[in-house]
Image (cartoon, grey):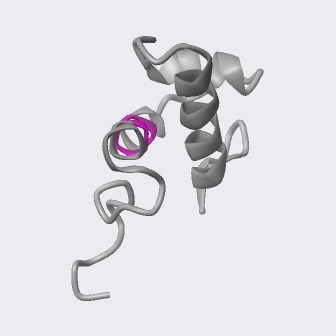
Amino acid sequence: MIVCSCAVITDKDVADAVSALRTADPFVVLTPGLIYRHLSKRPSCGNCLPLITRLMVGYDEDGPGSAASLPHRSHLE
């Protein structure tokens, strides 16, 4: 799923960035800006920042396969 159409960032890009950043430094403070910098991109309009934050936190806490990391899915799916 595309989470940032301005910079063309997918949910997989966010998951991969979280994984790479945690592997490099388990104590790093994750922020949307750090995710963008890791991906060598910059936010444009900023409408995606809340979604990137939710995905980043979900992936960091529960891993990329967690239901918490995919806020658009229902618990019934």
Please state if 58 lies on the left or on the right of 65 as rendered: left
Q: Residue furthest bottom?
A: 76
Q: Write down the quadrant of residue 69 in the picture.
A: bottom left
Q: What residue is drawn where x is 32% and y is 65%?
A: 67
Relative placement, left or right, of 6 versus 66 is: right
- Residue 2: x and y in percent read 62, 56
Q: Magenta span covers which residues?
A: 52-56
Give the tally of numbered discs.
0
Could you say where residue 44 lies in the image, as x and y percent from the top left? 62, 26
Quarter of the picture containing the N terminus is bottom right
Q: In which quarter of the image is residue 70?
A: bottom left
- In front here: 53 or 43? 53
Location of residue 1 with respect to 39 vertically, above or below: below
- Report the quarter where the C terminus lies: bottom left
Q: What residue is at 36 percent from the left and 61 percent from the top?
A: 66
Question: Does the segment drawn in magenta span residue 53?
Answer: yes
Regarding residue 14, the answer to whether it shows in the image is yes
Is residue 43 visible from the viewing direction of this image? no
Q: Where is residue 23 in the image (x, y as percent from the top left)?
A: 59, 25
Q: Is residue 14 magenta?
A: no
Secondary structure, magenta segment, majority class: helix
Residue 28 falls in image quadrant: top left
Q: Nearer the viewer, residue 27 or 46?
A: 27
Q: Which residue lies furthest to the right in this view?
A: 40
Task: Give residue 7's position: percent from left, percent from top.
Answer: 71, 36
52 vs 42, left or right, is: left
Residue at image location 44% in from the left, 32% down from the top: 49
